[in-house]
Amino acid sequence: MFNNLELKDKKAQIEMPKCINSSKRGQIGETMTWIIATIIIIVMLTITIIISDLSFGKNRKIQTDQNSDILASKSFFSYVLTKNAEDKNVYSQLQTEENLNDFNGNLAIKIFNSSYGEEYNDLWVGFPELQNNYFGEWTGLLEGERSFDAVQEFIKLDENKMLQLSMIR
Amino acid sequence: MSIQKNKKGAEKILSVYWFAILLIVAGAIVYLVSSFYGKPYDVREMEARLLTDKIANCLSAGGNIKENWQGLNADNFLEECRLVFTVEDSYGWDDDQYYAEIKISDFDSGQSLNEVNAGNPNLKLDCAVDDKNFPLCLERSMYSIDKAGKQYKISIFAAVRKTEKNVQ
């Protein structure tokens, strides 16, 4: 009986170190997992902070409406009311003529190029989709179309005729 | 018994670790939010544009220049155009944060016919410096005619300071 107990104790003494070894390995593995997880979390947070600092931190300007220009619109309206030597305004001239003439074409260039030429890359005045000698090929948008960088003004001359001012940044 | 004790110790260390991670994440979120919302929006360009638009509306309506434009002067300009240059009572501002200047000239000859200004004229001197800590300046022009058909060029200059509130 005593011998049997002694034998069991000895067996237990032999088995214990094995169990502790495998537990230690498990603990090391688990610790490594936590360390790597921590590093990933810190890296992710750092990347997020850097991105948000670079993208949102610098330019905090509020942009104004890019599709309207009150001063250009007022100039355009005054332009069509301007009279030539025969006391006929640009509006009446364009109602009866096929395209811009010397008076209203040169006047448009003088008004819009001098006031808005630096601000806008492309200026165009005329009948939509129709080339003219003063501003060249039509570069505007059709009525109702919108572009973020474009200012479009239309004045209706009659049922089928429109005068367009197009300014693109 | 010793393994059970180890487990309890490991759990305690883990909970400390979790608190540390939680603090790091919370700190990062606080930093992100403060870096995004802590800096002010620079609305001076918008203010200057609104000021020029408002002056343009005052000087030209229905395609014609304002009827009594010859009578505009530094004393009545703000009242005629319904402008108020009073600012909030902070940062030691003394209603000196805005400046506006108009120049009405003959469209063909370029000869100046009337020049009016209001506000703090010192702001115009600082416009030469292109830096966010200096006033934001905007100069625009428009074309107009009077009822007799005479053509004019109207130049509008606006400057807004308010750097303390818009720049950090």
Image (cartoon, coloured by chain):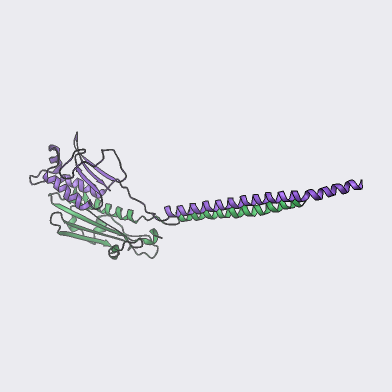
Chain colours: A purple, B green
- On the rendered image, what quadrant is the N terminus of chain A found in? top right
Left-right relation of A3 to B97: right
In the depicted structure, whether residue A142 falls above or below residue B124: above
Query: Within the image, what quadrant is residue A142 found in?
Result: top left
Q: Residue furthest right?
A: A1
Q: In the figure, is residue A121 to the left or right of B36?
A: left
Image location (x, y in percent) of residue B147: 14, 49
Query: Toward the viewer: B86 or B111?
Result: B111
Tell me where residue B82 appears, x and y as whole percent. Answer: 28, 55
Q: Position of residue B126 (x, y in %)?
A: 30, 64
**Closer-to-camera residue (B110/A27):** A27
Residue at 74% in and 52% down = B5
Q: Can residue B29 be spotted in the picture?
A: no
- Let me know if residue A49 appears in the view: yes
Residue at the outermost top position: A159
Please name whichever residue, B109 or B79, is drawn nearer the observer in this view of the structure: B109
Q: Residue at x 89, y 46 (%)?
A: A4
Q: Position of residue B111 (x, y in %)?
A: 14, 59
Q: Is residue A157 left or right of residue B40?
A: left
Which residue is painted at 53% across and 53% down in the image? Answer: A43
Q: How many marks?
A: 0
Q: Is residue A93 left or right of residue A72?
A: left
